[in-house]
């Protein structure tokens, strides 16, 4: 039973002039929803009137014929409708709350009986037609009742629409402190309007069963449903955006600001819930009328996070099973699909950014490796890695935000955690800082021969925490960057040219001019010795073993070792061929006599 008293209020100071008659018709529409739901022939209800048609008692000589049953049911149906019409007219005129409650109670009882009688009447008419028996009289009664109901329902629908429109305007103009009450009033009116749509749809179904042409009424109903769907969808979009914006402000607001913002939250939530509920009802009605409601389903999913907008059937669910099924359904619809959807969104976004990062890394690598680019090898790998990782980090942040995760608290937490971890990893962080200094000032590059931290070899890799050096005897040394940056760094291959220092020794009997001439000829004839700067060839000093000569030609850095070895070999061979004496270590020993003894 529907309690129609919830849709009417007594008149009085401050009441709206249209509320009385409109509320009466709203109550009538709600009652007609029950009225137009048929029950099988012979069903019983608690609202049965005295003297109703009942099954034949045991021992009755003969059952009434089908025509007699139809006449009896038609009479009862007509009598019940007459009583309800009188009560409805009386209700529209009534302003006192106590009288309205009495009338509503009587209507609840009468509607139950009428519901059963009308259902029985429709069933018996179809049975008469199936047996090809006369059915004009019961059809006439049914048509008369349905015509009256149709007139009342369409009139009530128009008044419902006007009431909703006026109340919507009042909500828009209402001050903040009154908005929640006005929103609740609008919710009540919206529910009544949805009930009116459903009632008319059921009414047209009954008329079709009687053979009445309802094409025009259904076309009008489709037009009204489409217009209402579009309007409620717009209201849902606006309420969702405002509610999300307000909740975001509440999360970031200070305590004193949050109190003021919370005052408007209940009204926004009421508007959002009303729009969701009404749009759900309208989508269900639109599906029954084969309207295109796919975009409204999408809006509902986006606004509520639910993956389905299916309607529950009251006749299938009973008792505790209904509540249990609804709880499970709500849990699955609201939580599981949402988590799955957000997980899919997260994976898709991360995958897209991963692809973009790979493509960007390839493009950057090609750009910095082209012949015209003058970027040190040390920075090339760092730039490529930094580009790829930066895009991936941005992708993860975007994926988290699009999945409904609040990124700001995570970043704040990472900042605090980073501060704590920094104390625990001071050495690692110092290596990181030293690595950044190496990358910025570039004292060496990958492939350079360096002498640092007691290691001499070729640089094969530089990261932000360590430098990898391969010595020339094929040993690999991984040196922490803080040790590299904290010591003297000797880069043997930093310049394009390098001086080859040769130190040569001869005996004391060697001809100085001859040795210098040999050195000049050997150096001048080597193809890889540079003419500029000119080589230096001199007698350096006289040692205890002989004469020390120096030859200092210049060569390209890449040719250093080949020039060094070639010159050393050629000079030795020339010295041997021209008889230059080798150095001879000498040591003089003096013996002194003391008291006649040596």
Image (tube, rainbow, N blue to C red):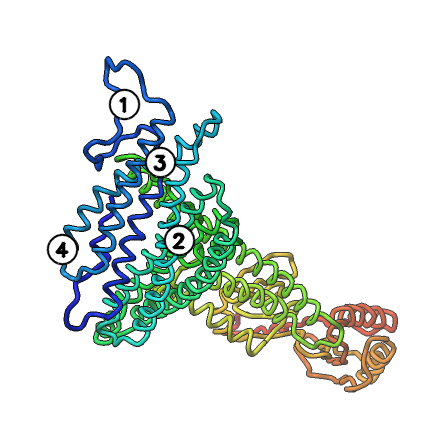
- Residue 223: horizontal and vertical position, in percent? 49, 59
- The disc, 1 or 2, on the residue closer to the chain's N-terminal end is 1
The CA span between labels 1 and 2 is 36 Å
Mark 3 = which residue?
119
Q: Nearer the viewer, residue 32 or 527?
A: 32
Residue name at image x 49 percent, y 65 percent: 480
| Residue 419 seen by the camera | no
N-terminal of the two: label 3 or label 2? Answer: 3
> Is the residue marked by circle 4 packed among few (<14), some (14-19), or many (20+) residues within 10 Å?
some
Residue at 38%, 64% in the rendered image: 240
Between the C-alphas of marks 3 and 4, the distance is 30 Å
Residue in front for this viewpoint, 592 or 119: 119
Q: Give SS at disc 2.
A: helix
Q: Residues within 10 Å of mark 2 (few under 14, many from 20)?
A: many
- Determine crowd level at label 1: few under 14, some 14-19, many 20+ residues with C-alpha closer than 10 A: few
**Position of 187 compared to 369: left or right?**
left
Give whichever of discs 3 and 1 has the lower sequence position.
1
Percent across and percent down for residue 83 are: 24, 45
Tell me the number on the disc at residue 197. Answer: 2
Q: Earlier in the sequence, mark 1 or mark 4?
A: 1
Q: Does dot 4 land on a helix, a strand or a loop?
A: helix
Residue at image mark 1: 55
């Amino acid at each position: 039973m529907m309690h129609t008293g919830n849709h009417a209020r007594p008149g009085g100071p401050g009441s709206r002039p249209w509320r009385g008659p409109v509320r009466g018709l709203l109550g009538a529409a709600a009652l007609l929803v029950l009225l137009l739901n048929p029950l099988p022939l012979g069903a019983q209800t608690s609202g049965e009137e005295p003297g109703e048609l009942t099954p034949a008692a045991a021992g009755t000589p003969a059952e009434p014929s089908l025509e007699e049953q139809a006449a009896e049911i038609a009479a009862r149906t007509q009598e019940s409708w007459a009583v309800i019409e009188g009560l409805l007219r009386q209700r529209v005129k009534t302003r006192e709350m106590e009288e309205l409650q009495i009338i509503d109670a009587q209507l609840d009882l009468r509607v139950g009986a009428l519901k059963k009688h009308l259902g029985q009447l429709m069933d018996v008419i179809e049975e008469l037609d199936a047996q090809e028996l006369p059915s004009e009289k019961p059809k006439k009664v049914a048509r008369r009742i349905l015509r009256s109901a149709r007139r009342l329902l369409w009139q009530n629908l128009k008044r419902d629409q006007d009431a909703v429109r006026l109340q919507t305007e009042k909500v828009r103009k209402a001050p903040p402190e009154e908005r929640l009450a006005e929103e609740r009033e609008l919710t009540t009116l919206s529910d009544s309007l949805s009930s009116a749509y459903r009632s008319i749809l059921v009414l047209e179904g009954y008329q079709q069963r009687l053979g009445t042409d309802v094409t025009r009424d259904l076309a009008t109903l489709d037009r009204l449903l489409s217009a209402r769907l579009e309007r409620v969808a717009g209201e849902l979009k606006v309420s969702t955006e405002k509610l999300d914006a307000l909740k975001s402000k509440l999360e970031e607001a200070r305590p004193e600001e949050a109190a003021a913002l919370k005052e408007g939250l209940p009204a926004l939530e009421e508007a959002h819930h009303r729009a969701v509920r009404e749009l759900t009802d309208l989508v269900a009605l639109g599906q029954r009328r084969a309207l295109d409601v796919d975009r409204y389903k999408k809006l509902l999913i986006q606004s509520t996070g639910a993956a389905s907008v299916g309607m529950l059937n009251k006749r299938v669910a009973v008792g505790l099973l209904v509540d249990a099924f609804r709880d499970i359904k709500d849990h699955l619809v609201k939580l599981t699909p949402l988590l799955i959807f957000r997980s899919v969104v997260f994976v898709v976004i991360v995958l897209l950014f991963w692809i973009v990062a790979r493509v960007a890394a390839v493009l950057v690598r090609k750009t910095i490796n082209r012949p015209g680019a003058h970027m040190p090898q040390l920075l090339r790998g760092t730039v490529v890695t930094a580009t790829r990782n930066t895009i991936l980090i941005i992708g993860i942040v975007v994926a988290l935000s699009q999945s409904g995760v609040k990124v700001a608290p995570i970043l704040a937490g990472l900042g605090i955690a980073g501060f704590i971890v920094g104390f625990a990893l001071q050495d690692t962080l110092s290596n990181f800082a030293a690595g950044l200094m190496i990358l910025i000032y570039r004292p060496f590059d990958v492939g350079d021969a360096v002498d640092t931290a007691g290691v001499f070899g070729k640089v094969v890799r530089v990261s932000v925490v360590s430098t990898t050096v391969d010595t020339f005897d094929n040993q690999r040394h991984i040196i922490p960057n803080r040790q590299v940056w904290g010591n003297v760094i000797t880069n043997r291959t930093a310049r394009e040219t390098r001086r080859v220092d040769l130190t040569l020794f001869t005996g004391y009997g060697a001809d100085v001019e001859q040795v210098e001439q040999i050195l000049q000829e050997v150096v001048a004839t080597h193809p890889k010795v540079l003419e500029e700067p000119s080589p230096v060839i001199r007698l350096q000093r006289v040692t205890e073993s002989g004469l020390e000569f120096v030859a200092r030609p210049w060569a390209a850095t890449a040719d250093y070792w080949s020039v060094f070895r070639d010159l050393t070999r050629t000079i030795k061979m020339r010295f041997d061929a021209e008889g230059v004496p080798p150095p001879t270590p000498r040591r003089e020993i003096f013996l002194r006599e003391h008291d006649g003894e040596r």
